[in-house]
Image (cartoon, rainbow, N blue to C red):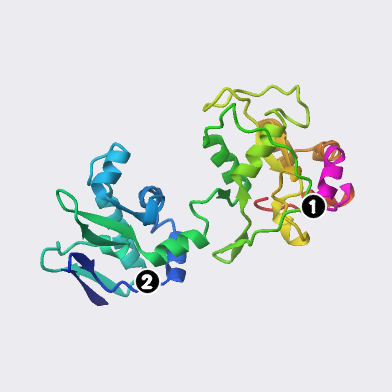
Amino acid sequence: MIEKICEIINDEYCCDIDITVEEWKQLLTNPKVFDDKSMEAIKKWYIESGHSATCSYIGKKYNEHSMSANGIINGLAGRVQKELGRFTVKGIGGIAKGTRFIVVMKSKLIDTKPKTWEWTLREELVKAIEELYIFSDDSYSDDDLVTDIGDIDISPDYPHFEYSGKPKDKKDPLNVQNKYLYPRSHKVSINALQHANYKCEFDNTHVTFTRRNSDLNYTEPHHLIPITYHNKFKVSLDVEENIVSLCCNCHKQIHLGQGFEVMLEKLYNERKDLLNMVGIDISLDNLIKLYKNEKGDN
């Protein structure tokens, strides 16, 4: 295993870190390397301008100790080195021998009073994050979409939405460990829930509960034509016209219960004209067949 020297030259941490974008993508999708705490820490830098910030700035922003992220990032860098298995970093001069931060970030001394180190996510890591849509307004499974939207603070003053009636181009699916995952936009789903006034569209008399984060009713978005079958259509299925608002019980029933055909017939008949307007052409019989064949995420 190669030992890479990290040293300070002209007020910058210098070390030849040669991790490619593709390698970062594999690492990012490995939960044994990028655990939840690591993702949370990385996101704090990712959302900053230039993906750069000092530790003291991050500490103040999130009401944490200025060094709180150091252990997390160093631990992450250690797991990256172990997973790749081709190099270790050794600090010399004024750098601690066990410093591994540099694997994930670059650093330079900035002229503040007092002077301090600014840390910047490596370009290859940033590109990998972007290509994987990790911190985007998207989810990659039905369950994740429901969970993510459940965590969002939706204001009662959320702008009123009207259907566009226009087809949308499909986004490219994401290939993760030889499995293709199709993105679902949080905004599109929230628009659909808002249009339904946060009521169950199978039966608007169904009782639900109030969202924890607002005074709105809790309902869940459901893609009437499952996203799993995006490859059968020339246009995007992740459009408001294809998303219905359902109470928790109806959402589970349409996926897992008996009587889903009756539910599909009602929802389909109410949506078929809207679906045609956005280029989604399917008969009720074929829609029912899709649900009978449905496997895994949708």
Residue 45 placement (x, y as % from top left): 36, 52
Mark 1 or mark 2: name the one nearer the start of the chain: 2
Vertical placement of residue 159 versus 89, above or below = above
Question: Is residue 289 among what the camera can see?
Answer: yes
Q: Of the residues shown, which amino acid type is indicated by label 2?
A: Ile
- Specify the label residue 19 is tagged with: 2
Q: CA distance from mark 1 to mark 2?
A: 42 Å
Other residues around mark 2 within 10 Å, as few (<14) / some (14–19) / many (≥20): some
From the image, give the main secondary structure of the stretch colored magenta: helix
- Specify the label residue 145 is tagged with: none
Q: Image quadrant of residue 257?
A: top right
Q: Report the residue that reaches farthest toward the bottom.
A: 2
Q: Is residue 88 shown left or right of residue 19?
A: left
Specify start and end residues of the magenta stretch as a single range. Answer: 268-284
Residue 134 placement (x, y as % from top left): 49, 54
> In terms of secondary structure, where does tag 1 sit?
helix
Residue 4 placement (x, y as % from top left): 23, 74
Residue depicted at x 34% and y 64%: 80
Q: Nearer the viewer, residue 130 or 70?
A: 130
Is 63 covered by the magenta stretch?
Answer: no
Residue 276 placement (x, y as % from top left): 85, 49
Is 283 covered by the magenta stretch?
Answer: yes
Other residues around mark 1 within 10 Å, as few (<14) / some (14–19) / many (≥20): some
Q: Of the residues shown, which amino acid type is indicated by label 1?
A: Leu
Q: Nearer the viewer, residue 41 or 80?
A: 41
Vertical placement of residue 84 versus 70, above or below = below
Read off the residue under disc 1.
Answer: 290
Which part of the image, by quadrant, shows the N terminus? bottom left
Question: Is residue 288 among what the camera can see?
Answer: no
